[in-house]
Amino acid sequence: MTLTKTQLEERLGMVTGSDAGAIEGTSPYTSVYQAWAKKTRRVVDTFSGNNKTELGTWLEAFAVKKYEEHSGKKCRMVHRTLRHKRYPFIGGHIDRLVEGDPNRGVECKAVTSDGMGKWFDEADELMVPAYYVSQVKHYALVTGRMIWDFAVVFTDGRRDPFFTTIEFSQGDLDLYLERCIAFWSYVDSDSPPDVDDSDATAATLKQEWRESDPGLVKVAPDFVMKYLSERSSNKEMKEVYTAQMQLMENRLRKFLEEADTIVSPKGEVLCTWKATKKGDRRFNFNFKREHANGKK
């Protein structure tokens, strides 16, 4: 679905289906922190579409046609933003609803060759990726329609369309609603959620704090001293970049923000996150064992 500028602006003021994968932790492309940063306008989503998204929009009509042929049901487009009856900050823009069945909706997807691997499980059987399940769970919460059909077409033309159905329980929606409310509390209070180890959070922090204040320093709290000490003494941590290391570096980025230097309580430089000529910021670690013992 291609959204207008008005719709893109509107979605900043509510939890949408695009946020569901972040809220449930099912998306490899986004995170709760990134979603929060976009809603609070700390970062700007500059993505305006590309050839793949445009192709996907064109193929929606084809997917609907195949779905109607396959199911014998008729679909209708939704030309307005739908919102939860009790919680108006939860809403979305939905592809199609099924006529004559008030408990059913349909989600159309066009899968390109480079994204096809995400639609197969370990047994090489077709499946719906978890983040798309989260997306239609969001639509179920907004509309009250508990049954969602997927109509999936493959752009390579070598596979037949894939149809499957997912049905949610009231318990599924109640739990998801709690997560939406918890997420929106961060947005509403302008308070950041905890950072995680995702690439999306790392990218968001780098964008949010792209510029530093040269010379602005912060004294290392206990969690920073502990991480720098472990990193200094563990050779493997220097050579193999792990999820735990990314988590700690994301925590360092959030701790530093515009500051570019971390010092010990005695004023020794332990770590810097300074701007480079390329316009990004990079870490430089200067922690030594004696810093942990307070002997230097």
Image (tube, rainbow, N blue to C red):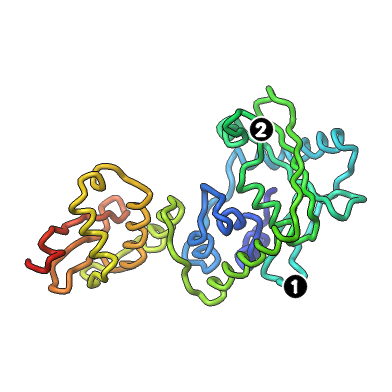
Tag 1 secondary structure: loop
Vertically, is 163 above or below 47?
above
- Quadrant in the rendering for residue 268: bottom left
Q: Residue at x 65, y 30 (%)?
A: 125
N-terminal of the pair, mark 1 or mark 2, is 1
Is 134 or 10 nearer to us in this picture?
A: 134
Tag 2 secondary structure: loop
Q: Label 1 is placed on what type of residue?
A: Arg
**Left or right of 280 in this view: 88:** right
The residue at which mark 1 appears reads as: 86
- Quadrant in the rendering for residue 53: top right
Where in the figure is residue 111, as x and y percent of width and height? Answer: 64, 35
Disc 1 from disc 2: Cα separation? 36 Å
Vertically, is 197 above or below 258?
above
Where in the figure is residue 114, as x and y percent of width and height? Answer: 55, 32
**Left or right of 81 in this view: 99:** right
Q: Residue at x 69, y 58 (%)?
A: 172
The number of numbered badges drawn on the structure is: 2
Where in the figure is residue 209, as x and y percent of width and height? Answer: 37, 63
- Quadrant in the rendering for residue 91: bottom right
Q: Label 2 is placed on what type of residue?
A: Leu
Where in the figure is residue 29, as x and y percent of width and height? Answer: 52, 48
Instruction: Determine the residue located farthest toward the bottom in the rendered image.
Output: 189
Q: Residue at x 85, y 49 (%)?
A: 98
The residue at which mark 2 appears reads as: 126
Marks 1, 2: nearer the viewer: 2
